[in-house]
Image: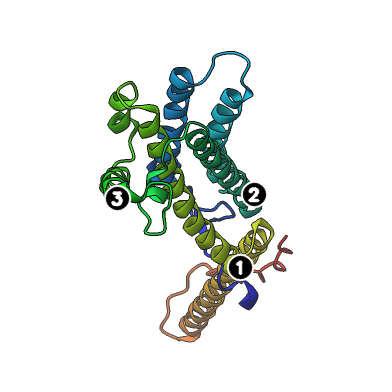
Amino acid sequence: MDKNKNVSLRRYADGTPSIMRRATIYTDLHFYQKSDVLLQLTKVFCERFLPKYGDRTVDQMVQAARSIKQNIAEGLTDGQTSFEVEIKLLGIAKGSNQELLEDYQDYLKHHSLPEWAAACRADNTDYPASAQYYMQRYDRLRSFCRQHSQLSDYAPLFYRLTDEEMANTAISLCHMVDRAMTKFLEKRDREFVEEGGVRERMTAARLDMRGTQKQIIARQEEEIAALKAQVASLNREIATLRQRPDTPESPESPEIPEIPESPENPATP
C-alpha cells in the first residue's frame, strides 16, 4: 500500500472506494469560457471580413476555434477516468489555439494593420510614433479581457468593432487561453506523477477494499470470541447452580450450545 499512498480515492456513500477522479466542472473554467468567446467571435469575424467563397481560411479559422472549445470540454470530461486522454486532448486544444492565434496575426500583416501588443513595444520600428497610443489601447483591451470571460460581455461588440479591433481582441484572448492552459496542464502533470493513472487508481481501490474486508472479518472474529466467552461463563453458572443441595429439582436445564467456529475467511478477490 505504500506505493499507492499518494493516490486520493473518492468514496461512495457506503464507503466503497471509486476509481473515478473528481469531476472538473469545465464550464466554470475561465479558459473554457474564453474559448467559447473565441469561437463565436471568429464566426462573426469571418462573416464580416473574409470572403464567403473561395478562401479556405474561413473554414480553417472556424475549425481551429471550435477545436479549442470542444477538446477542452471532451478532455476534462474524459479526464474523470483517464489522465492520458485528458492531457492529450488539452494538448490538441492548445495547438489549435496557437493555430488560430497565427491566423489572426497573419490577417493583420496581410492588411497592414498593427498588432497592438507588438506595436507598443519599445523596439517597434513599424509604428515608432504611435507606440504610446497603441500602449494605451492594448492596456485597455488586456484589462477588459482579463476581467471578462462570458460571451454576454463580448457579443454586443461583435458588430461594432473594426477588423483591427476584433483581431487584436482575439489575439489577446488566445494569449490568455494559452497561459491558463499551460498552468492547468502543469498542475495535471504533477497530479499524474504523484497519483498515477487509472491502473494505479484501480490497484489502490482494490487494496483499499481488501483492507476494509479484512477489518470487517477481524471485527466479526472479535465479536464471536466475546460471545463464546459469554456462553462459557453462562454454562459455568448453570453447572454451579446444579451442584447446590438446596436447589429444588427441576427439569434438566439444557446447556447453552457452543458458538461454532467461524468459517475460513473467504478469499478476497
Q: Position of residue 113 (x, y in %)?
A: 43, 36
Q: Secondary structure at mark 1?
A: helix
Q: Quadrant of residue 256?
A: bottom right
Comparing marks 1 and 3, which lies closer to the viewer? 3
16 vs 268, left or right, is left
Residue sitting at x 41%, y 84%? 246
Q: Which mark is residue 193?
A: 1
Residue sitting at x 53%, y 53%? 21
Q: Secondary structure at mark 3?
A: helix
Towards the viewer: 245 or 140 = 140
Q: Residues within 10 Å of mark 1 (few under 14, many from 20)?
A: few
Q: Which mark is first along the chain, 2 or 1?
A: 2
* Amino acid type at mark 2: Lys
Comparing marks 1 and 2, which lies closer to the viewer? 2
Q: Residues within 10 Å of mark 2 (few under 14, many from 20)?
A: few
Q: Quadrant of residue 188?
A: bottom right
Q: Write down the residue under mark 3.
A: 135
CA separation, marks 1 and 2?
A: 15 Å
Say if mark 3 contacts mark 2, CB within 8 Å: no
* Amino acid type at mark 1: Val
Q: Position of residue 50 (x, y in %)?
A: 51, 21
